[in-house]
């Protein structure tokens, strides 16, 4: 009986949604730290499909010689670092996340998020220029 109760407790702990994020956090591939950010969150709308907006964000990072730490083409987000080449008030390891959300077939929203709000605002302005806004 004790083994069954222990197995059920272990199973419920492992299948919990919160536990699945811990391996990603440990490996450095979690986006949970960007979800709760309030000050370093900026967004703008563009009149292009989300797939093209995502690719243009990747091209922006490539042209500026920034590191892409991890990305999800399916969920349309990119987390990058090495922003000291553009902005001197941050560390090389400071990350900025780019989330592309589909509004409709021809419109999408791009969200720039970082725990360094000054960096997020700077990258937001640079990305808007890059998109021609």
Image: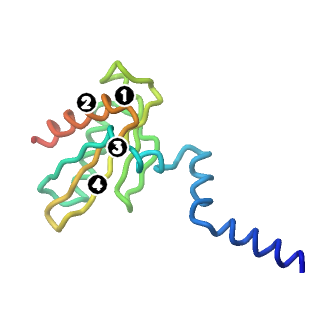
Name the element at disc 1: helix
Question: How far is mark 1 from mark 2, CA to CA?
Answer: 10 Å
* Residue 125 rendering spot, x and y as whole percentages: 19, 34
Return the disc, 4 or 2, that comes first in the chain's sequence: 4
Using the image as rendered, state which of residue 62 and residue 106 is in the foreground. 106
Return the disc, 3 or 2, that comes first in the chain's sequence: 3
Question: How far is mark 4 from mark 3, CA to CA?
Answer: 18 Å
Residue at 26%, 39% (x, y): give it: 60
Question: How far is mark 4 from mark 2, CA to CA?
Answer: 18 Å
User: Is 102 situated above or below 120?
Assistant: below
Question: How far is mark 3 from mark 1, CA to CA?
Answer: 20 Å
The circle on residue 100 is 4
The circle on residue 122 is 2
**Dot 3: within a 10 Å radius of its alpha carbon, few (fewer than 14), some, or many (20 or more) residues?**
few
Name the element at disc 3: loop
The residue labelled by disc 1 is 83
**Dot 4: within a 10 Å radius of its alpha carbon, few (fewer than 14), some, or many (20 or more) residues?**
many
């Amino acid at each position: 009986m004790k083994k069954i109760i222990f197995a059920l407790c272990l199973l419920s702990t492992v299948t919990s949604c919160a536990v699945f994020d811990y391996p990603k956090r440990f490996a450095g591939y979690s986006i949970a730290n960007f979800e709760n950010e309030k000050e370093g969150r900026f967004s703008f709308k563009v009149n292009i499909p989300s797939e093209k907006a995502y690719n243009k964000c990747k091209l922006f990072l490539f042209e500026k010689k920034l590191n892409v730490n991890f990305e999800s083409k399916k969920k349309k987000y990119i987390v990058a670092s090495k922003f000291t080449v553009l902005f001197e008030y941050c560390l090389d390891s400071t990350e900025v996340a780019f989330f592309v959300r589909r509004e409709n077939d021809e419109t999408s929203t791009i969200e720039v998020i970082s725990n360094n709000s000054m960096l997020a605002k700077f990258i937001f302005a640079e990305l808007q220029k890059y998109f021609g806004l």
